[in-house]
Image (tube, rainbow, N blue to C red):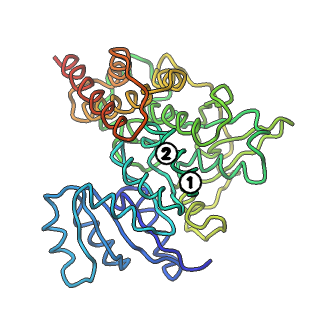
Amino acid sequence: MTCRTVTILGATGSVGQSTLDLIGRDADRYEVLALTAHNNVDALARAAIFHQAKLAIVTDESCYGALKEALAGSGVEAAAGREALTAGAALGADWTMSAIVGCAGLAPTLAAIRQGRTVALANKESLVSAGSLMMDAVARSGATLLPVDSEHNAIFQCLAGGRIEDVSRITLTASGGPFRTFSLEEMRQVTPAQAVRHPNWSMGAKISVDSATMMNKGLELIEAYHLFPVGLERLHILVHPQSVIHSMVEFRDRSTIAQLGSPDMRIPVASALAWPERMETPCRPLDLAAIGRLDFELPDVDRFPALRLARAAVEAGGAAPIVLNAANEVAVAAFLAGQIGFLEIAMIVEDVIARKAYDAPHAIEDVWAIDETARRDAVKVAEEMAV
């Protein structure tokens, strides 16, 4: 594999750190152009200096002075602000990791896609909020979009050598999160500290709560709808507590291909980083004999209504997925801040979706406008519930 230039959007998060870990193990093959973070100056500066990046960007402009000071004498250029973030994404790296959490990753991800290179997508919220716009941009630019979420990367690998028109069913697996066996009454008492302790994966707070509500799987359903155009009726979710099988693809001849691996994000990141080749990783080999058993069960949409809400948002189309995502981000933040209960997260999302009708977005500005309005509505609903 020839030397590849790389930009990482969201370099200090868990996916960004996994990417940097793999790059550091094979540094001669990668040249880091830009690394970005929101406000984690220390981690960003250390990574930028260690990996000899050309540019380090913080989106929080108040952190610019601290970043510049931390990079003094290193040869790494400092920049700050959302415009700088989008400009950094448009540098034209051969390979860009989009790992910014939330809708904040939409503009830089689109900027990277428009360069017509390879974009590894770990920012599901962008595709949820602007799936049609993003896929249109991919088609127009000729960019290659590689899914990094473990489930979508698994589907991507399962489809290698197969035709999308021969697919009869795609199954995304879900661990079920830390409250898979909890009753509704038990979930009513859940604390943020409990919700961020995922049984299998090491992830950030927001995505851990999404996994606990199973909204993460709902967002992944919407993401899969755009990435793998087989129709919503062919997309299914199956709870698999061991997180060994990451997804499955069934073809019309009833052959089913599954991708298995240890629950380590470096495996799907490595798949995207080295694609179309393969690379060594330090990940634990899969030992099925030690695991002993693989269990499966259907998801319970009564205890985890986020799955129902996400499927309904796909069916409704238009602005519904944007509202779903925006309201969920606000609700999760309110839960983590101790303002609302765990079960109220999905209640807020459902309430906000039902409040008003929105016109379908035709441009990124429409997405932002809908997102902003939905967030305001969600804040109001959260405040009402907190009283």
Looking at the rendering, which quadrant does residue 188 occupy?
A: top left
Secondary structure beneath label 1: strand
The count of marks equals 2
Residue 134 bears which disc, if any?
2
Where the N terminus falls, by quadrant? bottom right
How crowded is the residue under tag 1: few (<14 C-alpha within 10 Å), some, or many (20+)?
many
Give percent across and percent down for residue 329. 33, 35
Residue at the right extreme, as displayed: 253
Q: Name the residue under label 1.
A: 145
Give percent across and percent down for residue 373. 27, 28
Pick whichever, 142 or 108, lies toward us.
142
Query: Is 225 drawn above or below residue 106 in the view shown?
Result: above
Residue drawn at point x = 35 percent, y = 21 percent? 343
Query: Is 372 drawn above or below residue 1 in the view shown?
Result: above
Where the C terminus falls, by quadrant? top left
The type of residue carrying mark 2 is Met
Looking at the image, residue 236 sits to the left or right of residue 356; the answer is right
Give percent across and percent down for residue 283. 56, 63
Residue 301 bears which disc, if any?
none
Looking at the image, residue 120 sits to the left or right of residue 184; the answer is right
Residue drawn at point x = 24 percent, y = 31 percent? 334
Query: Is 311 drawn above or below residue 220 in the view shown?
Result: above
Estimate the spatial distance between the alpha carbons at disc 2 and disc 1, rounded to whole Å.
10 Å
Pick whichever, 298 or 275, lies toward us.
275
Looking at the image, residue 185 sits to the left or right of residue 76; the answer is right
Looking at the rendering, which quadrant does residue 126 occupy?
A: top left
The type of residue carrying mark 1 is Leu
Secondary structure beneath label 2: helix
Residue drawn at point x = 54 percent, y = 37 percent? 175
Q: Earlier in the sequence, mark 2 or mark 1?
A: 2
- The reply to whether discs 2 and 1 touch (Cβ–Cβ < 8 Å) is yes
Looking at the rendering, which quadrant does residue 108 occupy?
A: bottom left
